[in-house]
């Protein structure tokens, strides 16, 4: 995992195993309609090419709304979805088009806490020294590095 960070941008590139084995395996399952704990394939248009780009994601339902959290920060799908304003969530042959609203940092704490609680085994490494029992202040301190989007159909 390679980090590219500065005071305003946090972006962690997946390691070789994730890029070459884990993500392709999850994507293969999702294309066949098999979801692991709610996983979907996110499809979003490239911000310069206009071509569809895909990656596995874990959409999260929380208090009657659905969200996408970017545990690796300002990665390519985040940059693309900010420009496109939405995309598709795919599971097998079922495709759901959606739009997004990016959330401000001051409302992310309960969402990040729930995300860590649900997927700590998968994404906990990206939340250094943070777990579901961390304080709101600790979550607010890391919020700028974790984009969160509300999904609207």
Image (spheres, rainbow, N blue to C red):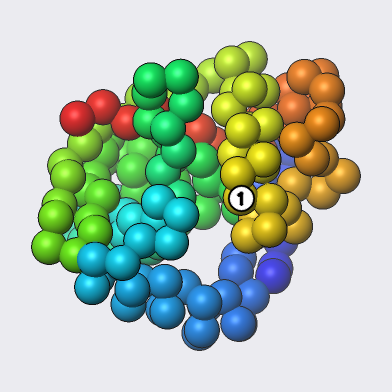
Query: Quarter-wise, where is residue 132 in the image?
Result: top right
Q: Is residue 150 above or below residue 10?
A: above
**Label 1: how many Cα within 10 Å (few below 14, some 14–19, many 20+):** few
Q: Is residue 135 visible?
A: yes
Q: Left or right: where does residue 79 sit relative to residue 11?
A: left
> At x 15% / y 52%, what residue is drawn?
95
The residue pinned by badge 1 equals 119
Q: Quadrant of residue 137?
A: top right
User: In the figure, 53 relative to 70: above or below?
Assistant: below
Q: Quadrant of the N terminus?
A: bottom right
Secondary structure of the residue carrying tag 1 is helix
Residue at 34% over, 43% down: 81
Taking depth in this image into account, of 66 and 45 the one nearest to the observer is 66
Is 79 left or right of 47, judged from the image as shown? right
Q: Residue at x 61, y 50 (%)?
A: 119
Residue 2 in picture, x, y percent from top left: 70, 68
Point out residue 62 in the picture as x, y percentages from the top left corner. 47, 26
Q: Quadrant of the C terminus?
A: top left
Q: Residue at x 60, y 82 (%)?
A: 17
Name the quadrant containing residue 35: bottom left
């Amino acid at each position: 995992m390679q980090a590219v960070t500065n005071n305003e941008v946090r972006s962690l590139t997946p390691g070789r195993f994730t890029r070459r084995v884990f993500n392709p395996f999850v994507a293969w399952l999702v294309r066949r309609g098999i979801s692991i704990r709610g996983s979907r394939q996110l499809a979003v248009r490239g911000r310069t090419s206009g071509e569809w780009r895909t990656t596995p994601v874990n959409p999260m339902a929380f208090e009657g709304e659905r969200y996408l959290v970017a545990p690796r920060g300002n990665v390519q799908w985040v940059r693309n979805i900010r420009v496109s304003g939405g995309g598709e969530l795919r599971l097998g042959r079922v495709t759901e088009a959606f739009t997004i609203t990016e959330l401000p940092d001051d409302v992310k704490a309960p969402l990040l806490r729930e995300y860590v609680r649900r997927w700590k085994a998968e994404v906990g490494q990206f939340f250094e020294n943070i777990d579901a029992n961390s304080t709101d202040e600790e979550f607010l301190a890391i919020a700028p590095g974790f984009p969160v989007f509300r999904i609207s159909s």
